[in-house]
């Protein structure tokens, strides 16, 4: 099981492991249009359900969620995930940001911070990302980070695209 407690700081963000106290933010994020469209409805529609969702994340082996917060006022703006999926050979990077914080370079900054952390501390050589092929904004972000299309995989009756980053 991966367990990380140290915050990661970038120029505009601090990335901290998710905590149950983040339930209000998580409730808002997982019910945003982009999350529902590209990640799926997690049936998290109450404070208690959000707390249970976070506890499940915290108890899942090989899964880390960081909450990205603005440095200046600690406002939570997004999530970066890093997980080992059963259908992939390598870890998978994921991200989701509240709509009002998209298109500002924050997701790129947060993802870059996590990529730097995992490559330097966990010595990863290949990092993957999976997404729906119609998630064009996320594909552009992955390509900006250096990921390249690698393959497709069918998961739960959905065709996902796999992008790969080879760390040198």
Image (cartoon, rainbow, N blue to C red):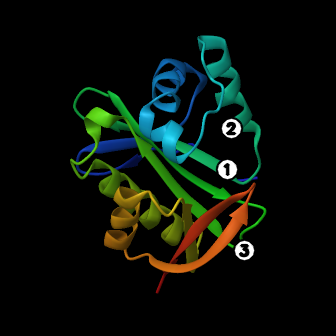
Q: Say which residue label 3 marks.
A: 89
Most foreground residue, 68 or 97: 97
> What residue is rendered at 46% in x and 87% in y?
168
Query: Which quadrant of the structure image shows residue 62?
Result: bottom right
Instruction: Give the camera-side residue of 92 and 137.
Output: 137
- Asked if the residues shown at circle 2 and circle 1 are in contact, with their CB atoms under 8 angstroms apart, the answer is yes
First of labels 3, 1 by sequence position: 1
Give whichever of discs 2 and 1 has the lower sequence position.
Answer: 2
At 72% from the left and 74% from the top, the residue drawn is 89
In the depicted structure, whether residue 85 falls above or below residue 21: below
Q: Residues within 10 Å of mark 2 (few under 14, many from 20)?
A: some
Q: Which residue is mark 2?
A: 57
**Which quadrant of the structure image shows residue 124?**
bottom right
Q: Position of residue 154 (x, y in %)?
A: 71, 66
The residue at which mark 1 appears reads as 63
SS type, badge 2: helix
Of tags 3 and 1, the one toward the viewer is 3
Residue 141 position by quadrant = bottom left
Secondary structure of the residue carrying tag 1 is: strand
The 10 Å Cα crowd at callout 3, few under 14, some 14 to 19, many 20 or more, is few
């Amino acid at each position: 099981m991966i367990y990380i407690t140290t915050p990661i700081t970038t120029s505009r963000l601090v990335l901290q492991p998710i905590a149950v106290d983040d339930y209000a933010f998580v409730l808002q994020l997982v019910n945003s249009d982009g999350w529902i469209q590209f990640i799926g409805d997690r049936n998290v529609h109450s404070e208690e359900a959000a707390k249970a969702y976070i506890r499940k994340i915290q108890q899942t082996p090989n899964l880390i969620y960081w909450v990205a917060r603005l440095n200046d006022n600690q406002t939570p703006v997004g999530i970066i995930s890093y997980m080992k999926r059963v259908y992939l050979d390598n870890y998978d990077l994921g991200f989701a940001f509240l709509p009002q914080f998209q298109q500002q370079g924050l997701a790129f900054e947060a993802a870059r911070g996590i990529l730097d952390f995992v490559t330097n501390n966990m010595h990863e050589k290949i990092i993957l990302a999976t997404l729906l092929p119609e998630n064009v904004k996320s594909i552009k972000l992955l390509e900006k980070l250096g990921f390249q299309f690698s393959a497709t995989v069918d998961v739960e009756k959905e065709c996902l695209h796999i992008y790969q980053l080879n760390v040198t």
